Image (tube, coloured by chain):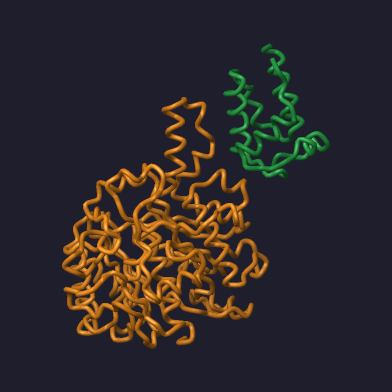
Chain colours: A green, B orange
C-alpha cells in the first residue's frame, strides 16, 4: 500500500486543522511538535480520520496520540506497510 | 472587607460586527442615521424558505482577521465573536499584559441562543450522506453554545473566569450582568457579549416554528413594533462584545470609563406568554433600578425589546408604565434593532453598545421603519433626537420567557 508522504501530511494538516506548513519544513524538522505547529488533539484526530477514509483502512489508536510528524509518519506508514 | 480599588463594572471597549456595520464607527453612524439594512435573505439554501427578510452581515470577511486554524474549527457565530472581541480589546487599548495579574485577570462571558447551526448542518449532512467516519472532530465543539467563550479565551490567551449564559434572548443582558458581577468580585477584565449566526438553512428551519417570526417579504414592512402593522420580528446575525473592566483598573492604565453597568434584573414568565411578560419585565426593571440606586425619573432613554407582536408590544409599554410610573410615558424610547433585525442574544448587546454610544454622543438613535406608534410611548422615530443621556435602561425578552433589564450610567456622570 502507498506510503504517506510529507506532501500528503502537509495537505491534510491544512485541510483538517487549518495549519499551513510546507512539506519541506516537515522534511527538515520532523521532530517539531504538532502543538508547536498549531495542530491540537482534535486536529490530529481529523487528520487520522481523513487518512482512514482515503486509504480505506483503520489506523492504530496511537496515531492520534503522536506528538510529532516524525512519530506519526513512522507509525502510519508501518501500519500501511503491514496491511499491504 | 475593605477593597481599595474601585470595582464598579466599567465599559471601556466596544466591538461590533453587525448587519449595519462591521466596526463600531460604521455601526454607530448607521444606527444614529436610522438606516435600515433589512433585506431579502440571500444566504445559500435559504432562498426558498418562508422567512423572506433578515438582517445579514454582508461586509465581513472572517479570513481577513482570523487565523485559518481557528476558522476551520469554528462556526460563523464564533467568527463574529472572535472579530468583535478583537475590536473591543483594540477599542479599550487593552493587551493581555496590561492588567496586574495577567493573563488570569481577564475572562470571557458570552451568551448564545442559536449555536453553530451552519457548521453543524454541514457535518450532519456528512453523517447522513457519507457516514459517521466523515464527520470532522471539530463538530464536537463548533456547534456548541460555549464555543465562542472557549475560542475567544484560547485565541487571546485569557485564563480568567470564563462562562456562558444560556438564558434565552435576554441572556445577552444576563451575560453583561454576569461579567459585571465577576468584575465586582475581583476579576479585573471580562470580555463579554454575544454574537449569533442563525441564518443557515437548518437554523432558519428551526425558527420557522416561532409564531413571532415575521413572514413579511417587504423589508420596510417586515418589522414594525409598536404599530398597528406589527407582524412579528425579523431575525439577524452578528453582535457585539464589550470590555467590562474594574473602573479602578481602567483608571490605573489610563483608559476611559465610558459607562458603568450599574444594575440588572432578570425574571421568567413562560414561553410566548406575552401578556404575562408585562409583570416580568416590570419586575426586572424595578430590580435593575434598585441595584443601580436609580429613581425612575433618572432614566433618560429606554432601549426597548420591541418584539413586534401586538400583545408583546402592549405588555412592554405597560411594563414601562408599571415600573417607571408617569415617567414611563414621557421617557424617550427607541428600538434601533428595527433597522438591523433581532440577533437573538446579540440583540440586547448591540442595544447596550448603542446605549453607551448614545450617552457619549448625546444623541438618541431612531427606530427605523416605524411610524404611527399605537401605544402610550414617546418612541423616537424618523431621526435621532439630541438629548443629554446620563442613564440608559436596556430591555430584552426571549421567546422562551426570559425578561431582563440592564441599567447603564454614563462614565462622566460617575
Residue B132 rendering spot, x and y as whole percentages: 47, 27
Name the residue furthest top.
A84
Towards the viewer: A50 or B250 = A50
Indicate left or right for B82 with B307 as reference: right
Compared to residue B300, the image places residue B237 above or below, namely above
Count the marks: how many? 0
Q: Residue at x 20, y 64 (%)?
A: B230
Q: Residue at x 46, y 58 (%)?
A: B110
Towards the viewer: B58 or B289 = B58
Name the residue furthest right.
A28
Question: Can see residue B69?
Answer: yes
Residue B271 rendering spot, x and y as whole percentages: 23, 54
Residue A27, quarter of picture: top right
Indicate left or right for B27 with B286 as reference: right
Indicate left or right for B192 with A55 as reference: left
Towards the viewer: A46 or B260 = A46
Compared to residue B242, the image places residue B289 above or below, namely below
Question: Can see residue B276?
Answer: no
Residue B13 rendering spot, x and y as whole percentages: 53, 71
Residue B32, quarter of picture: bottom left
Q: Residue at x 32, y 82 (%)?
A: B299
Towards the viewer: B339 or A26 = B339
Residue A46, quarter of picture: top right
Residue B18 rendering spot, x and y as whole percentages: 44, 62
Q: Residue at x 59, y 76 (%)?
A: B249
Amino acid at each position: 500500500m502507498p506510503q504517506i508522504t510529507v506532501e500528503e501530511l502537509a495537505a491534510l494538516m491544512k485541510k483538517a486543522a487549518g495549519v499551513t506548513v510546507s512539506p519541506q519544513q516537515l522534511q527538515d524538522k520532523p521532530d517539531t511538535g504538532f502543538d508547536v505547529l498549531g495542530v491540537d488533539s482534535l486536529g490530529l484526530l481529523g487528520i487520522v480520520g481523513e487518512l482512514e477514509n482515503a486509504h480505506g483502512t483503520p489506523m492504530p489508536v496511537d496515531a492520534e496520540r503522536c506528538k510529532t510528524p516524525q512519530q506519526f509518519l513512522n507509525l502510519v506508514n508501518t501500519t500501511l506497510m503491514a496491511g499491504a | 472587607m475593605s477593597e481599595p480599588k474601585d470595582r464598579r463594572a466599567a465599559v471601556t471597549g466596544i466591538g461590533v460586527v453587525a448587519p449595519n456595520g462591521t466596526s463600531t464607527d460604521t455601526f454607530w453612524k448607521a444606527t444614529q442615521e436610522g438606516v435600515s439594512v433589512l433585506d431579502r435573505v440571500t444566504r445559500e439554501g435559504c432562498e426558498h424558505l418562508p422567512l423572506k427578510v433578515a438582517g445579514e452581515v454582508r461586509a465581513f470577511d472572517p479570513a481577513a482577521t482570523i487565523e485559518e486554524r481557528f476558522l476551520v474549527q469554528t462556526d460563523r457565530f464564533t467568527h463574529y465573536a472572535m472579530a468583535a472581541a478583537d475590536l473591543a480589546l483594540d477599542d479599550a487599548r487593552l493587551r493581555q499584559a496590561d492588567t496586574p495579574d495577567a493573563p488570569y485577570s481577564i475572562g470571557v462571558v458570552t451568551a448564545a441562543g442559536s449555536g453553530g447551526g451552519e457548521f453543524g448542518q454541514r457535518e450532519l449532512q456528512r453523517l447522513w450522506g457519507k457516514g459517521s467516519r466523515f464527520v470532522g472532530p471539530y463538530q464536537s465543539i463548533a456547534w456548541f453554545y460555549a464555543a465562542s467563550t472557549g475560542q475567544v479565551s484560547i485565541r487571546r490567551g485569557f485564563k480568567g473566569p470564563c462562562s456562558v449564559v444560556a438564558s434565552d434572548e435576554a441572556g445577552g443582558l444576563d451575560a453583561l450582568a454576569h461579567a459585571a458581577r465577576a468584575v465586582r468580585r475581583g476579576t479585573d477584565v471580562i470580555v463579554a457579549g454575544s454574537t449569533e449566526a442563525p441564518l443557515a438553512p437548518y437554523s432558519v428551519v428551526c425558527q420557522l416554528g416561532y409564531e413571532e417570526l415575521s413572514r413579511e417579504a417587504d423589508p420596510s414592512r417586515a418589522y414594525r413594533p409598536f404599530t398597528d402593522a406589527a407582524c412579528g420580528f425579523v431575525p439577524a446575525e452578528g453582535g457585539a462584545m464589550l470590555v467590562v473592566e474594574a473602573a479602578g483598573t481602567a483608571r490605573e492604565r489610563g483608559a476611559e470609563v465610558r459607562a458603568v453597568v450599574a444594575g440588572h434584573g432578570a425574571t421568567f414568565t413562560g414561553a410566548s406568554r406575552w401578556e404575562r411578560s408585562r409583570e416580568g419585565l416590570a419586575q426586572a426593571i424595578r430590580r435593575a433600578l434598585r441595584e443601580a440606586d436609580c429613581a425612575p425619573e433618572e432614566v433618560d432613554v429606554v432601549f426597548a425589546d420591541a418584539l413586534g407582536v401586538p400583545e408583546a408590544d402592549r405588555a412592554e409599554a405597560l411594563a414601562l408604565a408599571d415600573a417607571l410610573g408617569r415617567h414611563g410615558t414621557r421617557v424617550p424610547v427607541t428600538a434601533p434593532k428595527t433597522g438591523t433585525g433581532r440577533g437573538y442574544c446579540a440583540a440586547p448587546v448591540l442595544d447596550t453598545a448603542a446605549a453607551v454610544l448614545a450617552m457619549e454622543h448625546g444623541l438618541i438613535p431612531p427606530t427605523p421603519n416605524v411610524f404611527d406608534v399605537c401605544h402610550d410611548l414617546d418612541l423616537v422615530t424618523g431621526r435621532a433626537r439630541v438629548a443629554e443621556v446620563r442613564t440608559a435602561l436596556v430591555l430584552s425578552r426571549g421567546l422562551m420567557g426570559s425578561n431582563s433589564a440592564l441599567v447603564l450610567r454614563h462614565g462622566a456622570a460617575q
